[in-house]
Structures are given as structure tokens and as C-alpha cells.
Image (spheres, rainbow, N blue to C red):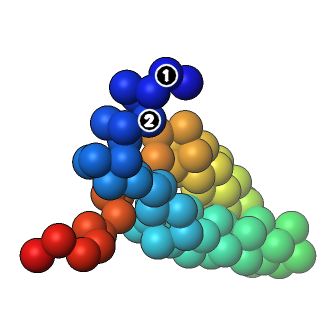
Amino acid sequence: MSAAGSSATHESGEKKAAGAFDVRNVIAALIGFYGVVLVVVGLVDNGEEALEKAGGVNANLWVGLAMVVFALAFALWARLRPIVVPSPETGED
């Protein structure tokens, strides 16, 4: 790292990733949780009556798997493209 690069970063303030406060992580956690619940319900409650209601398809299992994949995609997106938040400036007012 050159001296010019470090002084430019220091003058403009440090930048930090939003991390756990990124809304994409919250969305991924909620959808992932509900997806796991649906997968479990789809694996446990797959009787004839439940399959008849959905036209012979285990809807809970398939929708749960789709939600888990969606949640993983959101988490991966938040990890690969983090939101950068500048730190508040201190002093000199």
C-alpha cells in the first residue's frame, strides 16, 4: 500500500461493510428459516391426504427447497457485494 493511498483513505474516513445490519442478511435469515421449516414439514407430513390437497405434489418440500436456495442466493449476494458504509467523521466541526 502506498503512502498516497493510505492518506486518501485516512482523509476521507474509514469505510466499513454493513455486515449483519445489511437488510439482505435479515431477509436471507428469515426466508431460510421458513424454508427449513417447510422442508421439515414436507418430509414429515407427506401422507396421502396432504399429497391429494396439492395435486400429488409435495408442495411443502418443493417450496421449502426453493426458499432455502433463494436464501442462500441472498446470503451469497450480501457476501460478494457488501454495502460499504463510511464511518462517522470525528472531531473537526
Q: Can you say whether 62 is above or below 44 in the image?
A: above
Residue 38 seen in the figure: no
Callout 1: few (<14), some (14-19), or many (20+) C-alpha neighbours within 10 Å?
few
Rendered location of residue 4, percent (x, y): 37, 26
3D distance between C-alphas at marks 1 and 2 = 6 Å
Question: Which amino acid, by three-letter code, is at mark 2?
Answer: Ser
Q: Residue 29 lies in what quarter of the image? A: bottom right
- Image-based side of 48 in relation to 32, left or right: right
Task: Please name whichever residue, 68 or 88, is drawn nearer the observer in this view of the structure.
Answer: 88
Rendered location of residue 78, percent (x, y): 51, 49
Helix, strand or loop under label 2: helix
Q: Residue at x 66, y 74 (%)?
A: 33
- Image-based side of 26 in relation to 72, left or right: left
Rendered location of residue 28, percent (x, y): 55, 63
Q: Residue at x 58, y 52 (%)?
A: 75
Question: Which amino acid, by three-letter code, is at mark 1?
Answer: Ser
Rendered location of residue 43, percent (x, y): 86, 68
Residue 22 seen in the figure: yes
Per the image, the residue denoted by label 1 is: 2
Q: Residue at x 41, y 67 (%)?
A: 23
The C terminus sits in image quarter: bottom left
The N terminus sits in image quarter: top right
Q: Can you say whether 47 is above or below 10 in the image?
A: below
Per the image, the residue denoted by label 2 is: 6
Q: Are marks 1 and 2 in contact (CB under 8 Å)?
A: yes
